[in-house]
Image (cartoon, rainbow, N blue to C red):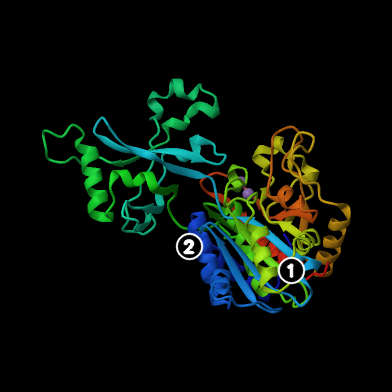
Amino acid sequence: MRQYNETEKNRLEQMASDYRSFLDAGKTERECAANICAIARAHGFRDLDEILEKGESLKAGDKIYAVNMKKAVLLMQIGQESLEKGMNLIGSHIDSPRLDIKQNPVYENSGLAYLDTHYYGGIKKYQWVASPMALHGTVVRTDGTVLELSIGEKDEDPVVGITDLLVHLSGKQMDKKGSTVIEGEALDLLVGSYAVDDKEEKEPVKAFLLKVLKEKYGMEEKDFVSAELEVVPAGRARDFGLDGSMIMAYGQDDRICAFTSLMAFLDAENSQRTNVCLFVDKEEIGSVGATGMQSRFLENTLAEVLNCLGQYSELALRRALKNSTMLSADVNAGYDPLYADAFEKNNAAYVGKGAVISKYTGSRGKSGSNDASAEFLGSLRRAFDADDIQYQTAELGKIDVGGGGTIAYITAAYGMDVVDLGVPILNMHAPYEVSSKADVYETYRCYKTFFQMGK
Ligand code: MN
Ligand code: MN
């Protein structure tokens, strides 16, 4: 780790504290998107929908935000230069691995009430049992009213969780492969054990649970059909390590890059070029659907903006995209000496050694990767070095050990220069992930420098 002076140390600690608050305020993509919008509004950004509704025009210097189905957000600061010349774009994702409640989830078994779940994203299922979980999400009732839930975060809230078999009886379980120690269908959430006082009732514990849901939340069993409820680890982001140098929290992949890019976007000074900060959903399941990076949200929003600027044409839109440069802001694996076998030491990212640039991701022979251009990397290297930023380069583990992808290849298809740049993480996709405060700070600095660059 580099040595920081007092001023830098204070800045770094303040940023870490703001980051923890950001994580606590957004443990689902919806919560995170709402929080980003609130922060944007507080910084003078206006809702694009409102501008469109009023038929207003846009001009250089305007600051706007657009929201996609409450799960993805785009922030834009319009520059003096024509939008056709391109944008400086940073894109991260605000969805994280978790357990989703199924649409018909409630059942009773042996005097216990459960909610059945379906896991979302890549998880080691055995990590998600025997620990306190919270329930976050949105329920749309039959009458159309909406219920926003967050249960398990306040001290006075109950938590929920998934049980594991006691070690005394686990001889057979312990002989299983890691991938089957806990099966997907065994990830059922224990949520109740009281029963209604009614001898006629065949499922008295389930009946009691439904009564609680009805009385406390005005929710019926059938309302689960039109609900998006997510089970996430309960509790707040914490300082980690006896020296407090790190942060442990749920969902740092990829809200750590969402936070640092947002802060950099708000702090950057660049009146020339248009800056865009993008936060998308569904990265963990392949960037699919209406709110994933593969949707037309970026393109459509840009078309609306060009139209409000009086510059819209199909060609202008294509040029704006093609002439842009982008940092795909996502995490990479931090080198873990306890699992040294999975890494190639000279091309691994080290926690505490700064932001990590990944020229390519993918698996096997770079399959599925966006392979960033040497020229683009050269321009970034010059800019980061000029600002004395600490960064490193890495691949995601040893060749043929595994792999992974980000949103980089999707926007690269427009013909823009894109490279992955983010924070190295330990325990990635585990209920609690670990990052270094210094890396948060250096990554913020990379993003800020990028937002201040010309083409
Ligand atoms: Mn990610
Ligand atoms: Mn991920």
Give the amino acid at mark 2: Ala
Q: Earlier in the sequence, mark 1 or mark 2?
A: 2
The percent coordinates of residue 338 (x first, y second) are 65, 39
Name which residue lies at 29% across and 44% down: 221
The percent coordinates of residue 337 (x first, y second) are 68, 42
Q: In which quadrant will I find the N terminus?
A: bottom right
Q: Tell me which corner region of the image, top left, top right, bottom left or bottom right, holds residue 245.
A: bottom right
Q: Is residue 302 visible?
A: yes
Q: Give the SS element for disc 1.
A: helix
- In terms of depth relative to the viewer, which is nearer, 291 or 312? 312
Q: Which mark is residue 451?
A: 1
Name which residue lies at 15% across and 34% down: 201
Q: Which mark is residue 25?
A: 2
Q: How many marks?
A: 2
Q: In which quadrant will I find the C terminus?
A: bottom right
* Cα–Cα gap, marks 1 and 2: 25 Å
The percent coordinates of residue 203 (x first, y second) are 21, 34
Instruction: Look at the numbered discs 1 and 2 and tell me whether their residues touch, using CB distance below 8 Å.
Output: no
The percent coordinates of residue 365 (x first, y second) are 79, 35
- In terms of depth relative to the viewer, which is nearer, 445 or 135? 135
Question: Quick check: 60 above or below 407?
Answer: below
Give the amino acid at mark 1: Phe
